[in-house]
Amino acid sequence: MKKIEAIIQPFKLASVRDALKAIGIDGLTITEVRGHGRQKGHKEVYRGQEYEVDLVPKIKLEMVIGADRADEVIDTIVNAARTGKIGDGKIFVFDVGEAIRIRNEDRGEQAL
Ligand SMILES: Nc1ncnc2c1ncn2[C@@H]1O[C@H](COP(=O)(O)OP(=O)(O)OP(=O)(O)O)[C@@H](O)[C@H]1O
Ligand SMILES: [Mg+2]
């Protein structure tokens, strides 16, 4: 299993969720976060104006998926989240050792 952590522009959340739903990704966690990349926030525009602080609002999506689906999920997120401008975000990929569904103790990919 892999965990995909994607930091995206907030206004791209709906299109990324729709695209993930369309390829059958069910479980997903979303957090409102703030951060900066290599421009340290200074040149980023958010809701039409340049952000004056150095931490820009972003959305973090986390999903654990079968390892064989990682490339498909990454491509889907990239295609749905990209504008081509700075601040589009980043995707980090982690190996996952175990997953357990609390209700019935399904394990591994059965639990996803
Ligand atoms: N190395 C990192 N570690 C953790 N979070 C990061 C890292 N780089 C970027 N982020 C997160 O992703 C968000 C978007 O990053 P961003 O797309 O601006 O990256 P970048 O490297 O500056 O690329 P670009 O030049 O396209 O802007 C940041 O606001 C931050 O929340
Ligand atoms: Mg940046």
Image: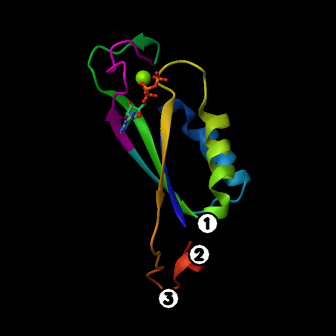
Instruction: Name the residue furthest right.
Output: 22
Vertical position of residue 23 compared to residue 36: above or below? below
| Residue that numbered label 1 is attached to | 66
Magenta includes 44?
Answer: yes
Q: Residues within 10 Å of mark 3 (few under 14, many from 20)?
A: few
Magenta extent: 32-46
Place of residue 97 in the rendered image (x, y in percent of width and height, measured from the top left)? 45, 72
Q: Are marks 2 and 1 in contact (CB under 8 Å)?
A: yes
Q: Is residue 86 left or right of residue 16?
A: left
Q: Which residue has dot 3 on it? A: 104
Q: Which residue carries the number 2 mark? A: 109
The residue lying at 47 percent from left, 75 percent from top is: 99
Q: Splitting the image into four quadrants, where does ligand 2 fall?
A: top left
Q: Say if residue 1 shows up in the picture.
A: yes
Question: Residue at position x 48%, y 36% from top?
Answer: 90
Task: Identify whether 111 is placed above or below 67.
Answer: below
Looking at numbered disc 3 in the image, what kind of residue is underneath it?
Asn
Q: Please, what is the three-letter code of the amino acid marked with disc 2?
A: Glu
Left or right: 24, with 108 as reference point: right
- State the residue lying farthest toward the bottom: 104
